[in-house]
Image: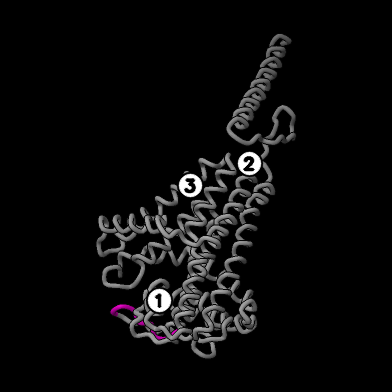
Amino acid sequence: MRQAVTVADAAGLVAGYALDAFLGDPRRWHPVAGFGRAAGALERRLYRPDRAAGTAFTALAVGVPVLLGAAGALATRRRPVARAVLVAAGTWTVLGGRTLRHEAEMMGRALRDDDLPAARRRLSHLCGRDPSVLDESELARATVESVAENTSDAVVAPLFWGAVAGLPGLLGYRAANTLDAMVGHRSTRYARFGTPAARLDDLLNLAPARLTGLLTVAVAPVARGDRERAWHVWRRDRNDHPSPNAGQCESAMAGALGVRLGGRNIYFGRSEVRPFLGDGPRPEARHLRRAARISGAVGRSALALAVAVALGRAALGRAVPRPTTVDRSVPGRAVPRPAGTEGRVRAALATVASARGTRSGTSRVGAGRGRAA
């Protein structure tokens, strides 16, 4: 049964990835958008400018999707087909790879056509920077950085947590990542309230971001990139970024494309100066298609690894030996302990019967000795 469950999880991940690759995000009634509206309503009820309120908000907003995912997994533990369908729907819901690549290509087209107004309008689909003051190079840089980071957030991390924790992992990760986008940024309102959501998102992305960086280095040649240069830049620059995770992805992408990322980012009402990542020229429109190609290759590689991990859970379960119990009626003899509730009951009854027989034998020996005396 465990093997059927893990195979169903793996099949659901593949099917969900295929749905995202061919269909992209639903245009209407997107579950993530619905979650965002529900989280916004919860925020309005719980908001106070302190971390305790932010912790309660994060725990509720993430805990409910995790519990729903656990309930769905429990309800389908003996129905592999239904479980595969449920995991596929969840995977499709939380992935955003096709939309990410599409936005990069649309931005590249607008920049190649010298249509800066269209490119500036497009940037809001990718990140929260103020596009009104950005020229072609800065728009291209913002797009490359967003593609690099969101390849982890929208593709690799959901697959990672889906492989490790199944449906609860998929839904829980997407909830945490969505909250980070809503309240995790530095602003007067969310300076303290949003900290728990931001920290949780950082924690959940520690492994996926580093995996994204390594996969970006590995697939660099699909976009005419130099794998050795990408490896060198990733190792040198990945920890220079103020984010514990974004630098892992952006430095690898900078090395793969042979460009320099980082610099001054202008948001609405504030600006931040980021260290430079990579060597070479600033990104241009021609780099955006290559970035999208790398993102797609990283996603396919992450899917293969996720399937291997999901199937490996079944192999690990088979490799763990079943616990044994000692048959006390035969000294030194160990017998397998049956699994499941019924098996535990049978084992308990057998132990009681064995003990009763032993006590009866002792009583008879004693009585015989008494009579002999």
16 in the magenta segment: no
Residue on which disc 3 sits:
70
Q: Distance between the residues labelled 3 and 1?
A: 36 Å
Element type where label 3 sits in the image = helix
| Image depth: mark 3 or mark 1 in front | 1
Asked which secondary structure carries label 1, the reply is helix
Q: Which tag is nearer the camera, tag 1 or tag 2?
A: 1
Q: Closest to the observer: 152 or 245?
A: 152
Please report contact status of discs 1 and 2: CB closer than 8 Å, yes or no.
no
Residue in view at x 45 percent, y 58 percent: 26
Residue shown at the point (47%, 61%) measured from the top left: 25
Label 2 neighbour load within 10 Å: few <14, some 14-19, many 20+: few
N-terminal of the pair, mark 3 or mark 1, is 3
Residue at the front extreme? 113
Question: Quadrant where the N terminus lies?
Answer: top right
Q: Name the residue under label 1.
A: 123
Disc on res. 1: 2
- In the depicted structure, whether residue 158 falls above or below residue 142: above
> Residues in magenta?
262-269
Residue type at mark 3 is Ala
Q: Closest to the observer: 35 or 201? A: 35
Residue 370 position, x and y percent, is 69, 12
Q: Residues within 10 Å of mark 1 (few under 14, many from 20)?
A: many
> Are circles 2 and 3 on residues that touch, CB within 8 Å?
no
Q: In which quarter of the image is residue 341?
A: top right
Q: Is mark 2 on a helix, strand or loop?
A: loop
Q: What number is the disc on residue 311?
A: none
| Amino acid type for the residue under numbered disc 2 | Met
* Mark 1 vs 2, N-terminal side: 2
Dot 3 surroundings within 10 Å: few (below 14), some, or many (20 or more)?
Answer: some
Q: What residue type is labelled 1?
A: Leu
